[in-house]
């Protein structure tokens, strides 16, 4: 039997398997106290997902896999960043960028300079800062 956790959200409690919690040992930039998150999917949000804190119901981020916008994005992340998470195979790479949806598609952006890298086998992640990538914290999605 899997251990379960109840996640409080603005729309009510959601029961999640503890196996679905991604642990960020260092937290996220600006939210160091939030270490555990659940990745939530909703057909109405596709291709976006919601990364919701399990510790604070008021902390959640709209995220997008960066390869939706930049096909070879994972190859632009230094290998040492993947290796720090224990990800060695290129086909096991998973990452997300935090997005802001503006009033129009042209005004929507993602933080491609500070992606969230995930080891989904161990359910751990970390946010890294890509200083030499040429990407912006407000990289346009279109």
Image (spheres, rainbow, N blue to C red):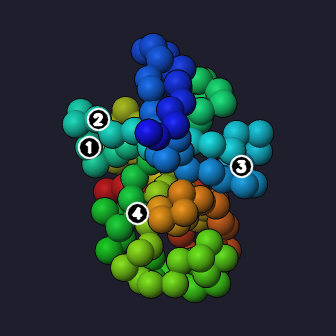
Q: Are marks 2 and 1 in contact (CB under 8 Å)?
A: yes
User: What residue would you read off at disc 3?
Assistant: 27
Q: Quadrant of the N terminus?
A: top left
Q: Nearer the viewer, residue 50 or 12?
A: 12
Pointer 2 local density, CA inside 10 Å: few below 14, some 14–19, many at least 20: few
Foreground label between 1 and 3: 3
Residue displayed at 24% across by 33% down: 44
The CA span between labels 3 and 4 is 20 Å
- Reading the image, the residue beneath label 2 is 42
Residue appearing at x 65%, y 66% in the figure: 128
Q: Nearer the viewer, mark 2 or mark 4?
A: 2
Depth check, mark 2 against mark 1: the one in front is 2
What residue is disc 4 on? 66
For image coordinates 44% across by 23% down, the residue present is: 14
Asked which secondary structure carries label 4, the reply is helix
Circle 3 — which element?
A: loop
Mark 1 sits on what residue? 46
| Disc 2, SS | loop
Q: Position of residue 97 (x, y in %)?
A: 49, 56
**126 sits left or right of 101 in the view:** right
Give the number of the mark in front: 3 or 4. 3
Instruction: Give the quadrant of residue 82.
Output: bottom right
**Residue 15, placed above or below residue 42:** above
């Amino acid at each position: 039997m899997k251990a379960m956790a109840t996640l409080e959200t603005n729309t009510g409690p959601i029961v999640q398997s503890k196996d679905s919690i991604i642990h960020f040992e260092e937290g996220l930039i600006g939210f160091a106290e939030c270490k555990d998150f659940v990745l939530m999917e909703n057909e109405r949000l596709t291709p976006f997902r919601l990364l919701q804190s399990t510790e604070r119901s008021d902390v959640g981020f709209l995220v997008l896999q960066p390869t939706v916008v930049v096909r070879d994005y994972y190859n632009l992340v230094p290998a040492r960043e993947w290796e720090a998470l224990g990800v060695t195979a290129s086909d096991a790479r998973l990452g997300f960028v935090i997005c802001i949806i503006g009033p129009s598609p042209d005004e929507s952006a993602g933080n491609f300079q500070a992606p969230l890298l995930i080891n989904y086998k161990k359910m751990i992640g970390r946010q890294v800062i890509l200083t030499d990538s040429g990407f912006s914290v407000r990289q346009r999605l279109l």
